[in-house]
Amino acid sequence: MTEQKQALFTIFGATGDLAKRKLYPSLFRLFKKGELADNFAVIGTARRQWTDSFYHEVVLDSIKDLMHSKTEAENFASHFYYQSHDVNDAEHYVNLKNLGERLKTQYKTAGNQVFFLAMAPQFFGVIAEHLKSENILTGEGFERIVIEKPFGNSYATAKTLNDSLAKVFTEEQIFRIDHYLGKEMIQSVSAVRFANPIFESLWNNRHIDNVQITFAEFIGVEERGGYYETSGALKDMIQNHVLQVLSLIAMEKPEKFDEAHIVKEKVKALKAMRQYSSQEALENFIRGQYIAGKFDGENYLGYREEDSVAPDSRTETFAAGKFLIDNERWAGVPFYVRSGKRMTEKGTRINIVFKKEAENLFADNCDDQPVQNVLTIYIQPTEGFSLSVNGKAAGQGFHLEPLRLSFRHDSEFLGNSPEAYEKLFLDVLNGDGTNFSHWEEAARAWELIDVIREAWDGDTSAMPTYTARSMGPQAAFDLLKKDGNEWAWQPDLWYKERGYYEK
Ligand SMILES: NC(=O)C1=CN([C@@H]2O[C@H](COP(=O)(O)OP(=O)(O)OC[C@H]3O[C@@H](n4cnc5c(N)ncnc54)[C@H](OP(=O)(O)O)[C@@H]3O)[C@@H](O)[C@H]2O)C=CC1
Ligand SMILES: O=C1O[C@H](COP(=O)(O)O)[C@@H](O)[C@H](O)[C@H]1O
């Protein structure tokens, strides 16, 4: 039986997009499952002057697609309280404290507190400071702080941010969200690796030729141009999500499958990654920006024409590169990564490309070349994995036929599986930081990324482009070609053959 959790949540930035789109629905999912029942309350805060009843309407609206019964939804919303508050104003924390104390008794939350900072990172330090100075932190129950990306804009800014949080919270109390770590198939990477000796025994440079990580998005920059102009694909996706996934693939087997041991191995893997010089960064990383394109009868704007984007912007909407890991397991194995907006279709996947057999036993029997074995882990939109293998084509004679052993979750399963934020919220309540980013991981990721960013900033040559709804600029393909490799997943070819780009 599910044991209900006891906690008072304080959401800073309660009127914002993240709170409405992700936080309230995730809390509601936990409520429907009984993880949250009677002993929780939520204080929502932001500067806007909202009443509790208006706040309830907002919460109800945010969960409308998930609710089956009005009574249940209203019961859930009744746990929410709104407190208008400017985080820079010390006096306002007094109201917050008083309300918190009242709700702690009313809802029997055992003094447990979760602070969710759904606000710009420049406010994190001031909030943490006031939580301490205004005695909102009492040490009575557990006290945890959850923060969103971006965690800094460079190593230096991330360090400043971390130092300010560390004055108030210990590392164990800080939960840095990387929502990809809450996704089902990212969590499954370790199961695929360590629960299957057939893979784990091959998981090294004797058998793996290269690893490819693709985070392709079909959407453009949407209404987030203002933020994206300060970020670009490198910082928005590669520094955090992609490097997190890479470290899970590359880490050594942890002694135990728990937070401390997993994090230790991830950090070791990140530290073994080659620190490029500026010149090496330019040789191994490429970028691109989408330009207007037509696909299947639809016209797409170029990035520079999007809202809140400078007409001469040099922000990359696509980044690809090759990382190398200088340790015994991975020496010589390129880890290719790519991520971009307005790519051919949405697809997050990992391709583990195994080495070819040195000799083709069947060369005298047929002209068919065996395909390389590729293990693909599908993160989204579908979830599952497949292995491409060679078989004999049925019938007379001997011919090789490429086959695919495939497992994909069906749509019914996907509909019922927990959403990333929901899982992460539950982890926070359970004090389990396994699926969160830790300071050492974030710090090392910034060290790897800063040099690429600086090299690009110093490069004044024309910005490479790619047409909207394609798989990135030509340079992304050349990057692999110069190693004698190619991307295992090229969905654009499928669309090209069927004339989608001409329509
Ligand atoms: N939206 C998303 O999907 C994602 C967001 N993030 C990150 O999460 C954070 C929040 O994003 P998002 O919700 O989109 O941002 P919004 O701009 O929608 O929300 C910001 C919130 O901060 C509040 N706020 C701003 N200044 C103050 C202040 N001085 N005192 C109190 N409250 C203040 C605003 O309310 P008010 O104006 O009423 O004060 C609002 O509730 C950002 O760091 C973002 O990068 C990360 C990943 C995804
Ligand atoms: O963190 C981010 O992730 C989203 C993509 O997340 P997904 O779960 O929809 O795959 C991306 O669109 C956004 O730019 C980035 O900030």
Image (tube, helix red, strand yellow):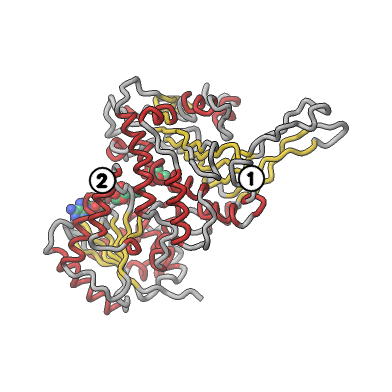
Q: Given the image, on which type of amino acid does mark 2 rest?
A: Thr
Q: Which mark is residue 445?
A: none
Secondary structure beneath label 1: strand
Secondary structure beneath label 2: helix
Task: Report whether the residue tagged 2 is closer than 8 Å to ligand 1.
Answer: no
Q: Badge 1 local density, few (<14 within 10 Å), some, or many (20+)? A: some
Residue in the foreground of this view, choosing between 107 and 202: 202
Q: On the picture, is 357 further left or further right than 181?
A: right
Rendered location of residue 453, percent (x, y) = 33, 34
| Residue at x 87% of width, y 31% of height | 397
Q: On the picture, is 70 further left or further right than 308?
A: right
Q: Nearer the viewer, mark 1 or mark 2?
A: 2
| Residue at x 55% of width, y 37% of height | 333
Residue 329 lies in quadrant: top right
Q: Is residue 144 visible?
A: yes
| Residue at x 40% of width, y 62% of height | 425
Rendered location of residue 386, percent (x, y) = 64, 45
As measured in the structure, the alpha-carbon distance from the residue carrying label 1 to the one carrying label 2 is 41 Å
In this rendering, the answer to whether 134 lies above or below 345 is below
Residue 44 lies in quadrant: bottom left
Q: Is residue 48 visible?
A: no
Rendering quadrant holding ligand 2: top left
Tell which circle, 1 or 2, labels the residue nearer the N-terminal end.
Answer: 2
| Residue at x 54% of width, y 29% of height | 492
Rendered location of residue 359, percent (x, y) = 74, 31
Q: Which mark is residue 386?
A: 1
In this rendering, the answer to whether 20 lies above or below 28 is above
Residue in the foreground of this view, choosing between 76 and 434: 434
Residue in the foreground of this view, choosing between 386 and 367: 367
Residue at image mark 2: 157
Q: Given the image, on which type of amino acid does mark 1 rest?
A: Ser
